[in-house]
Amino acid sequence: MKNALFVAVLSIAAVSAQAADRAHVQKTIELKDGSTVYIFKDGKMGMEDKLGRASYMAPGHVMETKDGKKIIMNGNEIWRVEELLHKDHKGS
């Protein structure tokens, strides 16, 4: 009984954390190379490559947006992007 309750509490916490991370995305920006940058409400950024995978981008790297503007990578929240992209792919 205690184990079942513990598993239920952990499951609820995991779902809440994933939903909270999606809620923390302030906006997304498409880059010229087909990648997407996620800007979180805390100002940190993470990147998804053109194939839909979370990818590394060095903090301070200058990126060009699809419309030709330049933005600078702030942080590298690859783990947050990974959570966003794979929230429905949790194995058992």
Image (cartoon, rainbow, N blue to C red):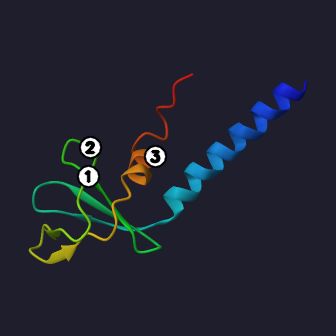
**Label 3 sits on residue:** 83
Q: Callout 2, which amino acid?
A: Gly
The residue labelled by disc 1 is: 56
Q: Nearer the viewer, residue 30 or 17?
A: 17
Q: Are marks 1 and 3 in contact (CB under 8 Å)?
A: no
Q: Secondary structure at mark 1?
A: loop
Task: Name the residue rendered at 40%, 45% in the picture.
Answer: 82
Say left or right for 11 vs 18. Answer: right
Q: Considering only vertical position in the picture, is 92 above or below 83?
A: above
Seen at 13% across and 67% down, the residue is 66
Q: Residue 12: x, y in percent?
A: 71, 43
Q: Nearer the viewer, mark 1 or mark 3?
A: 1
Asked if the residues shown at circle 1 and circle 2 are in contact, with their CB atoms under 8 angstroms apart, the answer is no
Q: The C terminus lies in which quarter of the figure?
A: top right
Label 2 Cα neighbours within 10 Å, binned few <14 / some 14-19 / many ≥20: few
Mark 2 and mark 3 residues within 8 Å of each other at the beta carbon:
no
Q: Is residue 84 left or right of residue 23?
A: left
Badge 2 element: loop
Q: Which residue is mark 2?
A: 52
Q: Position of residue 11 (x, y in %)?
A: 69, 37
Instruction: Count neighbours of disc 3 (C-alpha within 10 A) and say few if under 14, some if 14 to 19, many if 20 or more.
Output: some
| Residues at marks 1 and 2, CA–CA distance in whole angstroms | 13 Å
* Residue at mark 1 to residue at mark 3: CA–CA distance: 14 Å
- Asked whether, in this view, residue 51 is left or right of residue 14, the answer is left
Question: The residue under label 3 is which amino acid type?
Answer: Glu
Indicate the position of residue 77 as horizontal and vertical percent values: 38, 58
